[in-house]
Amino acid sequence: MASNEFLKSARSELARYVSKTGDFALVEHVIDQCKARLDTSEIVSLYEYIREESGRLEEEWRDEFIDAFDNIEPFLPDVEDL
């Protein structure tokens, strides 16, 4: 389990970046820290936060998120219908 402070910071930074660009290209360092520090439920929480806060369609960034976090796809919620 990661600290609440780390998770809060990572969620904010990733959601902000996705909202601006629709991808994770320049935040690989944050992704790497998340992989090392977050468990599966926290990664799912991260995904849900990005989905809610980024203002971007999941189709823009979902595949990249799945590629970044090995074996996470079965745990992620379905893409929300708009």
Image (cartoon, rainbow, N blue to C red):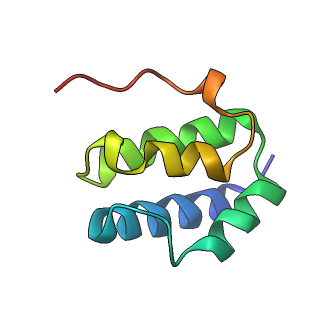
Query: Does residue 36 appear left or right of residue 74 in this picture?
Result: right
Q: Residue at x 63, y 48 (%)?
A: 67
Q: Does 56 appear above or below 19?
A: above
| Quadrant of residue 49 within the rendered picture | top left
Q: Which residue is drawn at 45% across and 38% down?
A: 48
Residue 6 in percent (x, y) is at: 67, 64
| Quadrant of residue 72 within the rendered picture | top right
Quarter of the picture holding the C terminus: top left
* Mark count: 0
Closest to the observer, 29 or 63: 63
Query: Does residue 50 appear left or right of residue 41 in this picture?
Result: left
Residue 60 in percent (x, y) is at: 33, 49
Closest to the observer, 76 or 39: 76
Residue 2 in percent (x, y) is at: 77, 53
Residue 26 in percent (x, y) is at: 51, 78
Q: Outermost residue, left direction?
A: 82
Closest to the observer, 75 or 13: 75
Q: Does 58 appear above or below 61?
A: above
Query: Does residue 1 appear left or right of residue 76 in this picture?
Result: right
Closest to the observer, 20 or 13: 20
Q: Residue at x 49, y 65 (%)?
A: 24
Q: Residue at x 41, y 62 (%)?
A: 23
